[in-house]
Image (cartoon, rainbow, N blue to C red):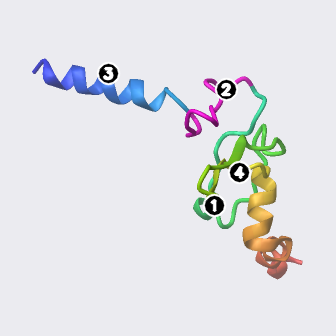
Amino acid sequence: MILFPVLMMAVLASNASHWYTGDDRCKPPQKDDATYSAPYNALDYPYDYPTFEGADKRGWFCSYQREDGVIVQFGDGRTPQEKWKDLYGSDRFNRRFMFFR
């Protein structure tokens, strides 16, 4: 019975820790200070153009070249609106409502 509350606290703590992932050279923001948009995956919303607050803000990103020549990148600097348009194109949204014109 004691194990359940301990596990629940661990899950809640892990979910609240970071929005973005990084490493020692690319340290992600530690909290939401409204500088960057929330992480957004356009594949999860094929028919919903992002209009939420912050959808026009850029996401956090960082990149560098390792000693062996490999380029490492974390995050995506596009806005959620740009990500959605890049994936679905602006015409796809208009075609969805074509029957109502």
Q: Secondary structure at mark 4?
A: loop
Disc 1 residue crowd, few under 14, some 14–19, many 20+, Cα 10 Å: few
Q: In the rendered structure, which segment of residues is drawn in magenta?
A: 19-33
Q: Residue at x 55, y 37 (%)?
A: 23
Q: Is residue 81 magenta?
A: no
Please state which of residues 98 and 30 is positioned toward the viewer in this rendering.
30
Q: Quadrant of residue 47?
A: bottom right
Q: Give the residue at mark 3.
A: 9
Q: Residue at x 73, y 39 (%)?
A: 37
Q: Give the residue at mark 4.
A: 76
- Image: 42 above or below 53: below
Q: Which amino acid lies under the numbered mark 3 shown in the image of this protein?
A: Met
Q: Give the residue at mark 2.
A: 32
Q: CA distance from mark 3 to mark 4?
A: 30 Å
Q: Which amino acid lies under the numbered mark 1 shown in the image of this protein?
A: Tyr
Give residue 1's position: percent from left, percent from top. Answer: 10, 21
For residue 77, which numbered disc appears in the image?
Answer: none
Q: Earlier in the sequence, mark 1 or mark 4?
A: 1
Disc 3 residue crowd, few under 14, some 14–19, many 20+, Cα 10 Å: few
